[in-house]
Structure formats: C-alpha cells, structure tokens
Image (cartoon, helix red, strand yellow):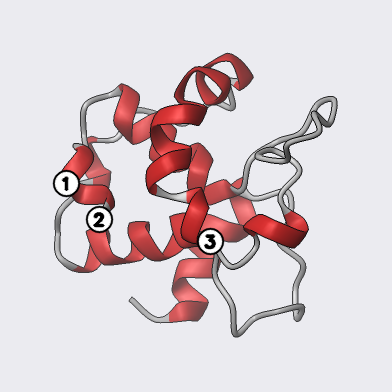
Amino acid sequence: MAKGDFQEYLCRPYCMFFREGVKEEMSCRAALILEGLVSREGVDLGKMPPLKKRPGLWERLKAVLGARVCGTCPFFSDDCDFQATKRVDDAEPCGGFILLAHLWENRLIKPADLE
C-alpha cells in the first residue's frame, strides 16, 4: 500500500496528530504494523466492525499494546502524551493505536501480528 493511500485510510480519519505536510516521511510504529498487516493480508479490513473511539478501551489495552507497539515508536519519547509518564488529561493515542486496539478487541489480530 502506498504511503499516501495509507495516510488517507488510517492517519487522516483516525489520528488527531496527523498534520498534512508535516513529518510525512515518518509513520508511527502502530501505522507501520498496520501497513504490514494489510500488505500481508494478515487482517481483513472488510470484516472489521465500524470503528468508534472508546477511551476506556485504549486505557485497558495500554499495557498490552503499548509494550509491543509504543516502545519502538519514533514519536514515543518526544510526542506521545498518551504514553507519557506524567499523565496528560484527555490524551488520545495515535490513530494506529486506536485501530490496533479495535482490531485486538474484535479478535482480528493476535500478539504475533504485532511483531
């Protein structure tokens, strides 16, 4: 999948951090994982239930997904309020994390898919 297509499908609709023309050469770790899953056909997006933003789900999966996804993300140390050690009120994860959490909850991905 071309990077422009991926930004159109994932980043623009789901990620509050996406800024047109800013850091376009970079992708968060979650987006890269999703890009790999889609290209390997490891996830069938046609079977995915409609996505709804659910902060309770993100918080519940923060430890599970964060350990596998966020620790190696290029935005983790400087730009990630969601995983910051000092809590930021109403912090929202990146769009990739939101979509991974949704896929995880609906059992459309498994731990090995996050490697």
Q: Residue at x 39, y 81 (%)?
A: 2
Task: Name the residue beneath numbered marker 1.
Answer: 112
Pointer 3 with pointer 1, Cβ within 8 A: no
67 relative to 76 in the view: left or right: left
**Between marks 2 and 3, how big is the CA–CA gap?**
13 Å
Numbered circle sitting on residue 73: 3
**Between marks 2 and 1, how big is the CA–CA gap?**
6 Å
Q: Identify which amino acid the numbered label 3 is placed on.
A: Cys
Which secondary structure, mark 2?
A: loop
Task: Name the residue beneath numbered marker 2.
Answer: 115
- How many neighbours does mark 3 have within 10 angstroms: few (below 14), some (14-19), or many (20 or more)? some
Mark positioned earlier in the residue sequence (3 or 1): 3
- How many neighbours does mark 2 have within 10 angstroms: few (below 14), some (14-19), or many (20 or more)? few
Q: Identify which amino acid the numbered label 2 is placed on.
A: Glu
Q: Position of residue 61 (x, y in %)?
A: 45, 25
Pointer 2 with pointer 1, Cβ within 8 A: yes
Residue 18, picture quadrant: bottom right
Mark positioned earlier in the residue sequence (2 or 3): 3
Q: Residue at x 45, y 54 (%)?
A: 30
Q: Residue at x 54, y 70 (%)?
A: 27
